[in-house]
């Protein structure tokens, strides 16, 4: 007889700084990591700095309009090249320490007395590049020397959830624009947040607004549990809003089967994608410490909707409430991970069994399955 209870990870997986360091090295610095919306660096020279694993990464756009990313470290004496979170340069990034300067492709182009150093290779001593891809209107980076397949790991996660890539492409996420961005500073381990997003056993307890809009969630099974399944709006619900009232102008390229449906996708290690008929919600997690995770959440709408000045509040408020309810629950769990009561972990009930695969993946990535 197969047990209806499956063990979770033990508590130290959420509290051990040494294990978190392994996760930074083996997960966040080896996999494709979604950092910014491409529109955040719309023009050449615009830049953002962001944290990936243990590294500060500088993301910009070169003169040809291609996204480029580099480790945010001057190659001379190791000073941080860009201290600001965002900004723009005309042609070069200039180190404040000794004025070494790099062009938008990372090449060393100027330094005091550079002509007296004829043996310095301006490419070899340029900024350390990071692999870059753009998809769904976002910039994804990978710090690994040889990155894994983007098609298998990132696009493949969407295909695994929805059944085919066309199902997400119909939302035209590349062409949507950010109507609202909210940054949450969550005092919890990143895995607690992923586990929460993957299951809906908690939905009837802490998400009354969400269950009103998506009543099937009251049964405890998340939309992610079934390949291709989207949770259907409830009777009388006309929009994915905080009170179920009418939403905004819909994304007119989705299929009839996707109308009045909600789809959720987890792209390991740090992206959640939520698809509804009139907007897309995308979360990017930035694990900062074993017990702290920054989450940036974008609400994406049709450009004409945002340009019209229409009130986005009811649409944004629904998932903002869901986020705050979820993050509060995760923060309540974090102290318990250190308790002797959770030293051996807890249990997963049947509607959470799919989380067991995530736990095994985390073990495999950090400890080789042990």
Image (cartoon, rainbow, N blue to C red):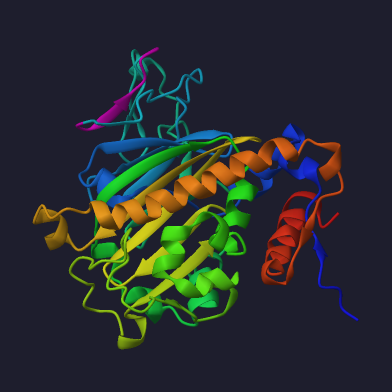
Q: Residue at x 73, y 64 (%)?
A: 356
Image quadrant in which the N terminus is located? bottom right
Q: Residue at x 34, y 37 (%)?
A: 48
Count of number-bearing discs: 0
Q: Relative to 295, is 42 on the left or the right?
A: left
40 w.r.t. 223: above or below: above
44 w.r.t. 171: above or below: above
Q: Quadrant of residue 212?
A: bottom left
Q: Relative to 186, is 175 on the left or the right?
A: left
Which residue is at the front of the view, 259 or 252?
259
**What percent of the width, then of the height, locates residue 249?**
17, 69
Q: Relative to 278, is 359 on the left or the right?
A: right
Q: Give the range drawn in magenta.
A: 90-98
Q: Residue at x 82, y 50 (%)?
A: 345
341 w.r.t. 117: above or below: below
**What percent of the width, then of the height, locates residue 62?**
27, 44
Which residue is at the front of the view, 106 or 287?
287
110 w.r.t. 284: above or below: above
**What percent of the width, then of the height, locates residue 235?**
36, 79
Which residue is at the front of the view, 367 or 192?
192
- Asked if the magenta segment contains residue 301, the reply would be no
Q: Relative to 39, is 321 on the left or the right?
A: right
Q: Quadrant of residue 70?
A: top left
| Residue at the bottom extreme of this rendering | 256
**What percent of the width, then of the height, locates residue 216?**
50, 75
Image quadrant in which the C terminus is located? bottom right
Residue 205 appearing in the image: yes
- Asked if the magenta segment contains residue 93, the reply would be yes
| Residue at the right extreme of this rendering | 1
Residue 29 appearing in the image: no
Q: Residue at x 64, y 49 (%)?
A: 191
């Amino acid at each position: 007889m197969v047990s209806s209870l499956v063990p979770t990870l033990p508590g130290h997986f959420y509290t051990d700084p040494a294990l978190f360091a392994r996760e930074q090295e083996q997960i966040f610095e080896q996999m494709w990591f979604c950092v910014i919306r491409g529109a955040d660096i719309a023009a050449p020279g615009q830049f953002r700095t962001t944290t990936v694993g243990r590294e500060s990464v500088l993301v910009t756009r070169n003169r040809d309009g291609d996204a480029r990313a580099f480790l945010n470290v001057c190659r001379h004496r190791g000073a941080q090249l860009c201290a600001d979170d965002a900004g723009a340069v005309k042609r070069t990034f200039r180190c404040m320490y000794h004025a070494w300067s790099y062009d938008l492709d990372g090449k060393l182009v100027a330094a005091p007395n550079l002509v007296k150093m004829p043996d310095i290779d301006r490419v070899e001593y340029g900024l350390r590049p990071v692999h870059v891809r753009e998809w769904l209107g976002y910039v994804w980076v990978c710090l690994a020397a040889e990155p894994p397949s983007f098609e298998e790991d990132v696009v493949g996660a969407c295909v695994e959830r929805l059944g085919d890539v066309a199902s997400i492409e119909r939302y035209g996420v590349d062409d949507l624009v950010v109507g609202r961005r909210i940054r949450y500073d969550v005092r919890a381990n990143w895995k607690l947040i992923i586990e929460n997003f993957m299951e809906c056993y908690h939905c009837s307890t802490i998400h009354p607004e969400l269950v009103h809009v998506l009543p099937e969630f009251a049964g405890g099974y998340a939309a992610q549990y079934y390949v291709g399944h989207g949770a259907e709006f409830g009777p009388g619900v006309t929009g994915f809003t905080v009170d179920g009232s009418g939403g905004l102008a819909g994304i007119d390229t989705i299929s009839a089967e996707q109308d009045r449906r909600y789809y959720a996708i987890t792209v390991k290690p740090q992206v959640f994608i939520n698809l509804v008929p009139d907007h897309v919600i995308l979360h990017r997690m930035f694990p900062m410490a074993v017990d702290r995770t920054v989450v940036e959440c974008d609400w994406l709408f049709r450009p004409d909707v945002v340009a019209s000045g229409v009130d986005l509040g009811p649409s944004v408020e629904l998932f903002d409430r869901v986020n705050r309810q979820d993050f509060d629950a995760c923060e309540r769990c974090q102290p318990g991970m250190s308790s002797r009561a959770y030293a051996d972990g807890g249990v997963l009930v049947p509607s959470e069994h799919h989380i067991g695969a995530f736990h095994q993946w985390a073990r495999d990535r950090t400890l080789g399955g042990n």
